[in-house]
Image: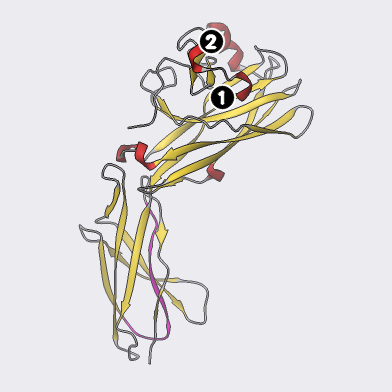
Amino acid sequence: MRIRATVAAVSGALVLSALAVPASQAAQSDDHGLTVGGFEFLRHGDGASPRAQARALSAQAAGLPVITKVVVNGGKPIVIGTTTVKKIAMSATATDDLGVLDVSALIWEGSSLSSPTSRYFEPNDDLVCKVASATTSTCTHTTTIDAGWLVNTDAKTWNVAAGAYGNGGEDDLTVVEKFNTVKLQRQSKLTVNAAPEPVKKGGTITITGSLTRADWDKNKYVGFGTQSVVLQFRKKSSTAYTNVKGVKSSSTGALKTTVKATEDGYYRWNYVGIASTAPVAVAGDFIDVK
């Protein structure tokens, strides 16, 4: 995988532009954390000092910030094609009796953030915070995911860490290593063709197509075989599709079935997806029934 990996053990990750320092001036492994790409990733919470662990168990009781909400990519899976370079929006909300200075999120995977083999998507330097009240703020920022960084085994569920700084000074800090998760999925594509056209009522219509998905190892779309795909039909006078029948894609991703012509309308394929691969529905192909 070509994502820049962490180069030192860290436990918890908090990205705050207010703490940004030149990487050349920052120690890459010390009691405070790690600086990558100009951001300081602070050590706190699980795997940090016993004092930090004890504080993390009851942040609210200790008067520390409480992270209440983290949303990555609008709550939807992150879908990446073969040439995609996508900025992923992230927002995090926290409360603190003294007000919130910054709150941020980080997408990562591995056994724990304290593992030297854990990996993450480096946040962009665009943290924007909005004060909702004297005690609550929501901050937004982005991270970039490039298809060129990925291999197929990266299509899985990633962790989302979150951290918040209150206005009470350097120790007014809470980090949650696994606040929630987000799926990273391979993009899928469908094609459809219904023929012949026009067709006599009662005649046979042959619907073909193909199902492919992004192969991050090869940087191209490849046929996706033995997948369940549903043929759907929409009457010319309707806006809704209904299921007609289920079909399995061939070993190369090819789709083919036949139906009887009844009335004018649109045929399409619909794929519901799997954990590693996003769902997709193709635009319908019109059939003129005479």
Look at label 2 and name its amino acid: His
Establish if 79 lies above or below 65: below
Residue 133 picture quarter: top right
Which residue reaches farthest right? Answer: 134
Establish if 34 lies above or below 195: above
Q: Is label 1 in a helix, a strand or a loop?
A: loop
Could you tell me which residue is drawn at 48 percent across and 7 percent down?
A: 30
Q: Is label 2 in a helix, a strand or a loop?
A: loop
The residue nearer to you, when weighing 196 against 64, is 196
Looking at the image, residue 12 sits to the left or right of residue 249; the answer is right
The percent coordinates of residue 71 (x first, y second) are 57, 39
Residue 250 picture quarter: bottom left
Q: Which mark is residue 240?
A: none
Region in magenta: 260-273
Q: Earlier in the sequence, mark 1 or mark 2?
A: 1
Crowding near the residue tagged with mark 1, few <14, some 14–19, many ≥20 C-alpha atoms within 10 Å: many
Looking at the image, residue 118 sits to the left or right of residue 62; the answer is left
Could you tell me which residue is drawn at 60 percent across and 33 percent down?
A: 126
Residue 113 picture quarter: top left
Look at label 1 and name its amino acid: Val
To which residue does mark 1 refer?
15
Q: Is 8 within the magenta?
A: no
Q: Is 263 within the magenta?
A: yes
To which residue does mark 2 refer?
32
The percent coordinates of residue 265 (x first, y second) are 43, 80
Could you tell me which residue is drawn at 34 percent across and 88 percent down?
A: 198
Which residue reaches farthest left? Answer: 251
The percent coordinates of residue 219 (x first, y second) are 30, 46
